[in-house]
Amino acid sequence: MDLLSPEECLLVAQKTLKEKEKANLLLLDCQLEAGSCDLVGYMGEYYKLRLIVEDIADKEKHELDYFIKSLPRKNEPQRAECERKGVFRKESAIYTKILPNVQKYATKKLFPQCFYSRNDLIVLEDLTQEYRHLKASESYTLEHYKLVLEHLAELHAASIAWEEKEQFNIGERYKDVLTELHLSTENSWFMTGLKAIVFLAARHPQYQAEKHQSFINNKLYNLLTKAEQLVTPSLTIRNVLCHRDTWDRNIFFRFGSDRYSALPSACCIVDFQLSKYCSPTLDVLFLLYIVAPASVRQEIYDECLDHYHIALQSHLTRLGLDEELISRENFLRECQRTRLAALIIWALTEPQTKMSASISNRLRSEEPEKFDYYLNTDRSEMLLRVMQLQPGYEQTIMSPIQELVDYLMENEHLYA
């Protein structure tokens, strides 16, 4: 196995079995296998690792399972992009320097434990031993959304507690770590995505009138670039450590003794590559806009905002902090300010997350250079190709385009 050396594997085992004497642990076997197709990520490759170790003092054997995130090894353009953006350097630092300190102030597991990291890979606990994604046949209910919002509220409150305890600012102390890798004009993926939004808007059947085409061709792109300002640390609300990538594949649920019962008892979030010190409303809104179908979001939106804020205040009180550090009025006003960022992230991600895995994996494996071009230079050809290959795809990705354009045409004055 060339991903990890035997010495590194033994170190991982030693960190896992902390109660054992390090010198007594003997590595018997390392087994590595590629993650299943549904675990393929845009910013890395995933593996499962099993270590078999023996404590020579008591002759007891241990089988230890892990999840590995690695820089892409098979796809050179994808690897180059990850290295250029420093996504693994960032996430490694977050897992080792920031998250353990936040966890100290939480009552539940906020994230998978990290046992080892380098600038090109991270070895994490295998959450699938206790948690799982929702299956394709399962749908989020209001209770699922509330559970994730409670989780985010505790993450946010714990980050505030850490700051208050040590009297410092996370954003300032870790400004070299918590860089904006997502909605930034320096990110070619983001800028290419904005051009794709304009391309789709111009094709939308409801925007063929002259007034719509004029708005799309002359104003839309510049308004979309305002997203970068909305994800910088807020001047109007207490900033927190935000996950910033709460889409379905980054949310795991635990169902107690019955992993397939209807309602989960807990959740856990993974992938901190996009984490940032910013407004807590971004985590809340990104969840509701990326995961919830538009019709569902409209029904549960107000209740979810209230539920999050009540959970946040509860955790602030538990931690001995003033629950009015983020008042309800301030929170709701900030949600209005940052709503555009959520609309944009929905329109940016929907074409990728709703592309079938078979099409996406085939494009990446058979045409890696062209796929990199699609992601970072021009997506119009890819969008047209997938529209032809995947029934219903065009209607699906046009939904966020319509809501975004309608919103901006009505509220252009807020962002001019």
Image (cartoon, rainbow, N blue to C red):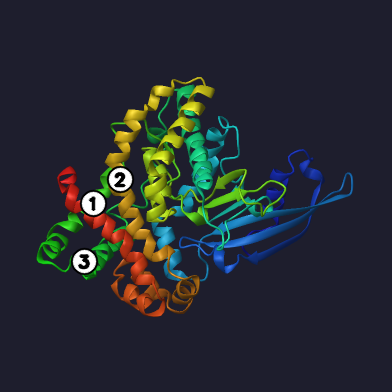
State the residue position of label 2: 339
Residue 79 horizontal side relative to residue 222, left or right: right
Which label's residue is closer to the chain start, 3 or 1?
3
Q: Which numbered mark, 2 or 1, is in the foreground of this view?
A: 1
Residue 171 coordinates in the image, percent (x, y): 39, 35
| Quadrant position of residue 380 | bottom left
Q: For the residue labelled by badge 1, is the local secondary structure a helix, a strand or a loop?
A: helix
Q: Which residue is identified by label 3?
A: 206
Q: Which residue is mark 1?
A: 407
How far apart marks 3 and 2 lie (CA) works out to 23 Å
**Amino acid tagged 2:** Arg
Q: Quadrant of the N terminus?
A: bottom right
**Nearer to the camera, 119 or 362:** 362
For the point 51% across and 34% down, which residue is it? 154
Of tags 3 and 2, the one toward the viewer is: 3
Give how far apart the Cα atoms at labels 2 and 1 are: 10 Å
Which circle's residue, 3 or 2, is located before the other in the chain?
Answer: 3
